[in-house]
C-alpha cells in the first residue's frame, strides 16, 4: 500500500501510545480513521488529537471511535459489524491493543496468563475473523502488533512472549492464505517505546528484564508510527522500527547461542548483585 489517502483504517488500541501515534500519522496522510478501545473518555480525547492532524484542506475525512474489549468475542462481532455498516469495510486494519505485566513465571497466576493471551492474541484473532470475510472482496492491509519479545523469549515475559510469539506464527500463516485475495499481512515488532503502557509495565518489571533492555534506545511512539507506515509502503513482513531490534532479529536467527549467552550473563550479574547464586 503506497498511498493511505481516502483509505478506511480501523485501529484497535488507537486511544493511546503506538496505536494513537499510528492513528495520527494516518490522519495526516488523509485516511478515514476509526479507533477502538475500552475506555470511552480516553477514546474521545484521542479522537480530538487525531482529527487535529487531518489534511487541512480535507473536510471529507471521517473519524470515529467505538468502545470495544478485543478479548470479548461476542462484543467484537457486534461492534465490528456495526463499524462496517457505518464506516465501510476497512482497507487497513491495525491490531494494536495489548498490554504487559512483566513478572517471573512463578509469580504469574492463571488469571494473568489467561488475560494476557485473551487480550494480546485472541483479540487479534477476534477482529481478524470478523473482518477478513469483508476485506476479501477488495483486498487491504492487516498489521498485527507483536514485539521484540515476539521473536526472542525474554526474562520476565513468559506470558507476554508466548502471546507475542503466537501473533507472529498466526500472521505468517495468515499472510500465506490471504495473499490470493490481495490482502497483505505484516507484523510490527516495536522495541521499548515511551508510551503510557510502557510506564505501567515498568511498575512490575524485574531488575533482570530492565538490565537486558537497559542500553537500548527508548523510541517515541511517533517514530514507531513513521516506521510502520514506511514498512507498509514496502510491504515488509516483519516491520522492526529500531536498529537494535533489526540486529537482534538477525542474530537470533543466525547465532541464537550468542544471544542467549549475552542475556544469561546480564541476568547473572543482576542476581549476583543481590547476593544470589
Ligand atoms: N510500548 C512498548 O514498549 C511496546 C513494545 C513492544 C510492543 N508493544 C505493543 O504495542 C501495543 C501498544 O502498546 P502501547 O505501549 O502503545 O500501550 P498503551 O499506551 O497502554 O495503549 C494500549 C491501547 O490498547 C487498548 N487496550 C488495552 N486492552 C484492550 C482491550 N482488552 N480491548 C481493547 N483495547 C484495549 C488501550 O485502551 P483501553 O485501556 O481503554 O482499552 C490503549 O488504547 C501493544 O500490543 C504492546 O504489547 C509495546
Image (cartoon, grey):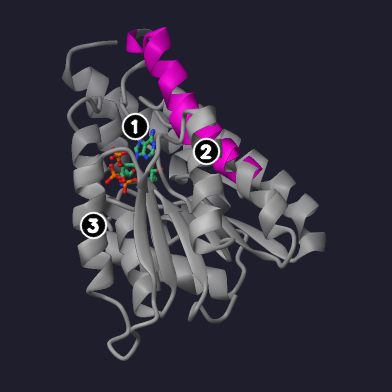
Residue 236 figure quarter = bottom right
Viewer-closest of 234 and 121: 121
> Is label 3 or label 2 in front?
2
* 234 sits left or right of 114 in the view: right
- Ligand 1 neighbours mark 1 (CB distance < 8 Å): yes
* Quarter the C terminus occupies: top left
Q: Quadrant of ligand 1?
A: top left
Q: CA distance from mark 3 to mark 1?
A: 21 Å
The residue identified by callout 3 is: 46
* Quarter the N terminus occupies: bottom right
> Is label 3 or label 1 in front?
3
Q: Residue 146 at x, y = what percent?
A: 49, 45
For label 1, the SS is loop
Rendered view: 9 above or below 130? below
Q: Residue 28 at x, y = what percent?
A: 34, 78
For label 2, the SS is helix
Q: Tell me the tag on residue 100.
A: 1
**Residue at 25% across / 43% down in the picture?**
40
> Is label 2 or label 1 in front?
2
Mark before the other along the chain sequence, 2 or 1: 2
- Ligand 1 neighbours mark 3 (CB distance < 8 Å): yes
Q: Residue 160 at x, y = what percent?
A: 43, 29
What stretch of residues is rendered in magenta?
A: 107-129
Viewer-closest of 246 and 107: 107
**Residue at 19% across / 40% down in the picture?**
199
Amino acid at each position: 500500500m503506497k498511498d493511505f489517502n481516502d483509505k478506511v483504517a480501523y485501529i484497535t488500541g488507537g486511544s493511546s501510545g503506538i496505536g494513537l501515534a499510528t492513528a495520527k500519522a494516518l490522519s495526516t496522510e488523509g485516511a478515514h480513521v476509526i479507533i477502538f478501545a475500552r475506555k470511552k473518555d480516553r477514546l474521545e480525547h484521542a479522537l480530538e488529537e487525531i482529527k487535529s492532524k487531518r489534511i487541512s484542506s480535507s473536510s471529507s475525512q471521517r473519524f470515529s471511535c467505538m468502545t470495544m474489549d478485543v478479548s470479548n468475542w461476542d462484543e467484537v462481532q457486534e461492534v465490528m459489524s456495526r463499524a462496517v455498516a457505518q464506516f465501510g469495510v476497512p482497507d487497513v486494519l491495525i491490531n494494536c491493543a495489548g498490554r504487559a505485566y512483566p513478572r517471573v513465571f512463578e509469580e504469574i497466576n492463571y488469571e494473568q496468563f489467561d488475560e494476557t493471551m485473551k487480550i494480546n492474541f485472541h483479540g487479534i484473532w477476534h477482529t481478524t475473523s470478523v473482518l477478513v470475510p469483508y476485506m476479501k472482496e477488495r483486498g487491504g492491509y492487516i498489521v498485527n502488533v507483536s514485539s521484540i519479545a515476539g521473536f526472542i523469549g525474554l526474562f520476565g515475559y513468559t506470558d507476554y512472549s508466548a502471546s507475542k510469539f503466537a501473533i507472529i506464527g498466526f500472521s505468517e500463516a495468515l499472510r500465506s492464505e490471504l495473499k490470493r485475495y490481495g490482502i497483505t499481512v505484516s507484523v510490527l515488532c516495536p522495541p521499548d517505546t515511551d508510551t503510557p503502557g510502557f510506564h505501567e509495565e515498568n511498575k512490575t518489571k524485574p531488575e533482570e528484564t530492565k538490565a537486558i533492555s537497559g542500553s537500548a534506545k527508548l523510541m517515541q511512539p511517533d517514530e514507531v508510527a513513521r516506521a510502520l507506515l514506511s514498512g507498509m509502503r514496502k510491504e515488509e513482513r516483519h516491520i522492526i522500527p529500531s536498529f537494535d531490534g533489526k540486529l537482534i532479529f538477525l542474530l537470533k536467527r543466525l547465532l541464537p547461542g550468542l544471544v542467549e549467552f549475552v542475556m544469561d550473563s546480564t541476568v547473572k550479574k543482576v542476581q549476583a548483585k543481590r547476593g544470589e547464586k
